[in-house]
Image: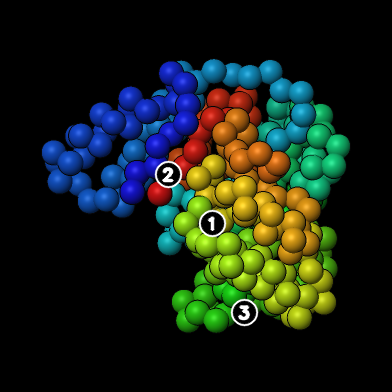
Amino acid sequence: MVRPLSGGPHSGHDVRTALKYIARSAGIDRAKFASMRMCCERHVLARVGRSRKRYIGRILCYHTIGQEEWGVNDVTPSMFRRHIELALNAGYRFVPASQIVKTGGGPKDLAITFDDGMKSVLTNAAPILKDYNLPWTFFPVSEWTDQKVDWAKEKCLNWHDVEKLMADGAEMGSHSATHPDFGKIEFAQMVDELAGSRDLFQRRLGYAPPTFAIPLGQSMNWKDMSMKAAKDAGYDVIYAQAEETRPTGTIPRTFISKFDGDRIFKSLLQGKFDRWEEWV
Ligand SMILES: [Zn+2]
């Protein structure tokens, strides 16, 4: 399903429609097309998108660092390091995401977060973050961390890894029990995902996080009743993505993709992607 983009004249919608037509005509498969289209959108928006004056901090949303199977959500270690260098050279400072949530932060404050709790957060991202002594936050999927699914054993953080990262100072929040699309599930399942995840963290770590990052993270992946289920389960901070289209009451984050070289990264710091939503 192609996700409709909420957005104005620079949202990339026209580019998306044209590319879809070309891909269909050329017989390009869905995954390749999706990746190609995202690449084009990111490049076009970086060129023609509108910069916005910034008054508060910005929270970046990464997934994996050098774990290629995560596709468009994977950023190479060298690109990740480059992002940090670009930001520091442009006068930004990195602060914990919780600080931006609490105070709003200043226009030159940035925070780094990782969704999904994949292994490369430990093996590749953490050492780089340590090199620069930067604070950061991660959101594991509790049943992946619990290795209830076979594929997670090699690819995801385990409880020992999560404990180690927290002991090293990383903030940790939940990213649900099994990573469903909250836009498509019933209230009872939302409760299971939200409360169940929090309960598993409590049992395995002795800590039930009060923060939650929405799986998939976009406006259509969260409903009003999802917010009620989250509050009932004990979460008080809900991280989403696209700043200008996110669900009411959530905290915005800026999505980072594998295509985000210097130009795109600088553009997203200027707010050119604040209406952009990743589609699936
Ligand atoms: Zn996720």
Q: Residue at x 40, y 32 (%)?
A: 41
Question: Where residue 249 is drawn, which disc sits there?
Answer: none
Q: Is mark 1 within 8 Å of ligand 1?
A: no
- Of circles 1 and 2, which is in front? 1
Residue at the disc numbered 2: 279
* Residue identifier under label 3: 146
Distance from disc 1 to disc 2, alpha carbons, whole Å, reads 15 Å
Q: Kindly state the secondary structure of the residue where label 3 is placed.
A: loop
Q: Earlier in the sequence, mark 2 or mark 3?
A: 3
Q: Given the image, on which type of amino acid does mark 1 rest?
A: Phe
Crowding at dot 2, Cα within 10 Å, few <14 / some 14-19 / many 20+, comes out as some
Whichever of labels 1 and 2 marks the residue nearer the N terminus, that label is 1
User: Is 133 positioned to the left or the right of 3 in the image?
Assistant: right
Nearest the eye: 124 or 268:
268
| Residue at image location 62% in from the left, 79% down from the top | 146
Q: In the image shown, does 90 or 117 lie closer to the viewer?
A: 117
The picture places residue 269, in percent across and down from the top left corner, at 63, 29
Residue name at image x 60 percent, y 38 percent: 246
Whole-Å distance between the Cαs marked 1 and 3? 21 Å
In the rendering, at what x and y percent does residue 198 appear? 72, 69
The location of residue 165, given as percent across then percent down, is 75, 66
Q: Is residue 254 visible?
A: no
Return the mark for residue 182.
1
Residue 188 occupies quadrant: bottom right
Q: Which numbered disc, 1 or 3, marks the residue closer to the eye?
A: 1
What residue type is disc 2 on?
Trp
Could you tell which of marks 1 and 3 lies nearer the N-terminus?
3
In space, the residues marked 2 and 3 are separated at their CA atoms by 28 Å
